[in-house]
Amino acid sequence: MNDLAGLLKVKGDYAGAEPLHVRALAVRERVLGPGHADVAQSLNNLAELLLVKGDYAAAEPLFRRALATYQKTLGDDHPSVATTLNNLARLLEAKGDDAGAELLHRRALAIWERSLGSGHPNVATSLNNLALLLAAKGDYAAAEPLYRRALAGVYKIFAVG
């Protein structure tokens, strides 16, 4: 259910994806218990869908619950924590909370650098996300070096340049 919902989301079939995400979450909670990392994954996936749909009020508590569950089960420095921080940062940006989003983007970046290394694609994506936010705020001096680091990472990852 979870994977099919993800596929439908990618295809833009949000109406088809949402009930599958809700059902997958319910099954995982019943079978694994509410504090399991797979439940956090379902929470995060459903929240991502709601974010794309613009339902920020419904998405935020799901992201926050996923984050708390990941931190409790996997620890504060796990890549899944960084993923959820990044997604929550995107939500805060959409709501206009640039300061909160920046803090979460920086936390996600730090976790990915520590846990995956500076050459990982998630680090390049995180650098780019933070740079986008800073540029949107008009802080071009802070954004440029982040864009350059992201670009250098992409060159290494894909051996282009």
Image (cartoon, helix red, strand yellow):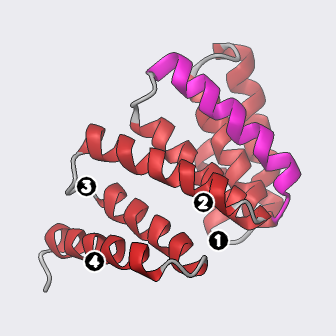
Q: Amino acid at mark 4?
A: Arg
Identify the residue position indicated by label 2 in the image.
Answer: 7
Q: Amino acid at mark 3?
A: His
Residue 98 as seen in the image, left or right of residue 56: left
How many badges with numbers are in the image? 4
Sooner in the amino-acid sequence: mark 3 or mark 1? 1
Measured from the top left, where is residue 43 in percent x and y? 69, 37
Sooner in the amino-acid sequence: mark 4 or mark 2? 2
Measured from the top left, where is residue 28 in percent x and y? 68, 24
Does residue 37 lie above or below 21 as drawn?
Answer: above
- Mark 3, mark 4: which one is toward the viewer? 4
* Marks 3/4: CA–CA distance: 15 Å
| Callout 4 crowding tier (Cα within 10 Å): few <14, some 14–19, many ≥20 | some
Q: Amino acid at mark 1?
A: Lys
Closer to us: 37 or 143: 143
* Marks 3/1: CA–CA distance: 26 Å
Closer to us: 65 or 53: 65
Q: Amino acid at mark 2?
A: Leu
- Mark 4, mark 2: which one is toward the viewer? 4
| Callout 2 crowding tier (Cα within 10 Å): few <14, some 14–19, many ≥20 | some
Residue range highlighted in magenta: 54-74
Measured from the top left, where is residue 158 in percent x and y? 18, 73
Figure quadrant of residue 145: bottom left
Identify the residue position indicated by label 3 in the image.
Answer: 120
Residue beneath the point at 55% across and 48% down:
104
